[in-house]
DNA sequence: GGGTGATGCTGAG
DNA sequence: TCAGCCTCACCCC
């Protein structure tokens, strides 16, 4: 379930669970990361940093573990030793208070700080790292001659947005996914950034993407909502818009499915 | 038990 | 543009 909120939340929770500056037991039950695990085993972590959908684990001996979950990668956090790893467990890190399992990542490599810097240099501003990336976001967006629905998935424009957030952010800002990036007003661009900061922070805290204002669905809190009830448009084609009851429409933008409300997000002229 | 799609991205063509 | 990759939850039989 990897958009930016997942990486930041994991960086925070895993640092707590594993403990910093104490030696970790690292291994690769599946074997596909045996060489990397051997480099890290017995060493201590200095910090865990998330940047967009990328995670960088800084080890005291100077190496960096680079993880990107991709579409299907998953972490499991367990107190103590956790269960027996399965044949798909790529990485196990056991520390002070618990154990982290990793399965199915797109990237799991040991790199050096220069290589880390190269990866980060390609990324746009990450709303969870600093709320003050709005100007850079606007600059990057302005260089793109593509629909805003495609630009939001481009990690060099904004880092950490995935398919759920792009649909929800465009709904929350009333922008049609096919609006050309270059046709957005300054106010719309600013609203997209501001809304990203807000929504990603909430998702990082809750551990799930819940964008619905609880009073729109008669709920007490966002935390009481779930994937069925907690989004405005994502995977809701054919269902009534929570605001105006117009039927939510499914389209494809940048080869990925995207949903919008034709009334709340009018097609650009 | 098999088939499929998924919150992602790359590299070949 | 599109197949390929990685894993698993979910659906249908």
Image (cartoon, coloured by chain):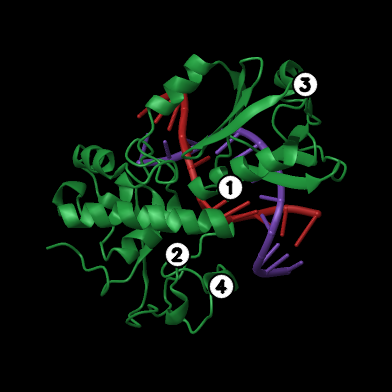
Chain colours: A green, B red, C purple
Check contact, mark 2 vs mark 1: CB within 8 A: no
Can you give x and y, in whole percent of width and height, for residue A37 in the image? 74, 22
Give percent across and percent down for residue A257. 41, 56
Report the residue marked by disc 3: A41
Asked if marks 3 and 4 touch (Cβ < 8 Å), the reply is no
Image quadrant where one finds the C terminus of chain A:
bottom left
Determine which of the numbered discs, if any, sits on residue A176 in the image: none
The vertical placement of A155 against A172, above or below, is: above
The residue to which callout 1 is attached is A9
Could you tell me if residue A164 is visible in this image? no
Residue drawn at (16%, 46%), measured in percent from left and top? A182
- Residue designated by label 4: A225
Residue under mark 2: which chain is it in? Answer: A
Whether marks 1 and 3 lie on the same chain: yes
Assess disc 4: are there few (<14), some (14-19) or many (≥20) residues with their C-alpha within 10 Å of its C-alpha: many
Quarter of the figure with residue A130: top left
A176 versus A136 height, above or below: below
* Of the pair C4 and A82, the residue shown nearer to us: A82
Considering only order in the chain, which callout, 3 or 1, is on the residue closer to the N terminus? 1
Judge left or right: residue A252 versus residue A70: left
Indicate left or right for A226 with A213 as reference. right
Report the Cα–Cα distance between label 1 and label 3.
Answer: 24 Å
Q: Nearer the viewer, mark 2 or mark 1?
A: 1
Using the numbered discs, state the Cα–Cα distance from disc 2 to disc 3 in whole angstroms: 41 Å
* Left or right: B1 as drawn, with respect to A211: right
């Amino acid at each position: 379930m990897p958009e930016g909120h997942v990486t930041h939340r994991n960086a925070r929770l895993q640092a707590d669970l594993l403990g910093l500056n104490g030696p970790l037991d690292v291994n690769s039950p599946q074997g596909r990361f045996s060489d990397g695990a051997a480099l890290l085993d017995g060493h201590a972590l200095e910090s865990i940093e998330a940047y967009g959908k990328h995670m960088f684990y800084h080890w005291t001996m100077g190496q960096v573990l680079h993880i990107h979950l991709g579409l299907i990668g998953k972490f499991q956090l367990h107190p103590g030793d956790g269960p027996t790893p399965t044949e798909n467990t790529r990485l196990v890190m056991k520390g002070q208070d618990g154990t982290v399992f990793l399965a199915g990542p797109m990237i799991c490599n040991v790199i050096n700080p220069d290589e880390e810097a190269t990866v980060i240099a390609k990324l746009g501003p990450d709303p969870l790292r600093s709320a003050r990336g709005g100007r850079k976001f606007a600059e990057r967006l302005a260089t793109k001659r593509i629909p805003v629905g495609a630009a939001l998935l481009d990690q060099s424009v904004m880092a950490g947005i995935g398919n759920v957030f792009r649909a929800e952010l465009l709904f929350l800002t009333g922008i049609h996914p096919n609006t050309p990036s270059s046709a957005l007003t300054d106010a719309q661009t600013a609203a997209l950034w501001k809304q990203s900061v807000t929504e990603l922070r909430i998702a990082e805290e809750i551990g799930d993407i819940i964008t619905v204002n609880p009073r729109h669905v008669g709920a007490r809190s966002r935390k009481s909502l779930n994937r069925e009830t907690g989004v405005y448009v994502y995977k809701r084609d054919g269902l009534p818009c929570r605001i105006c009851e117009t039927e939510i429409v499914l389209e494809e933008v940048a080869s990925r499915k995207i949903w919008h409300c034709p009334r709340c997000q009018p097609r650009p002229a």
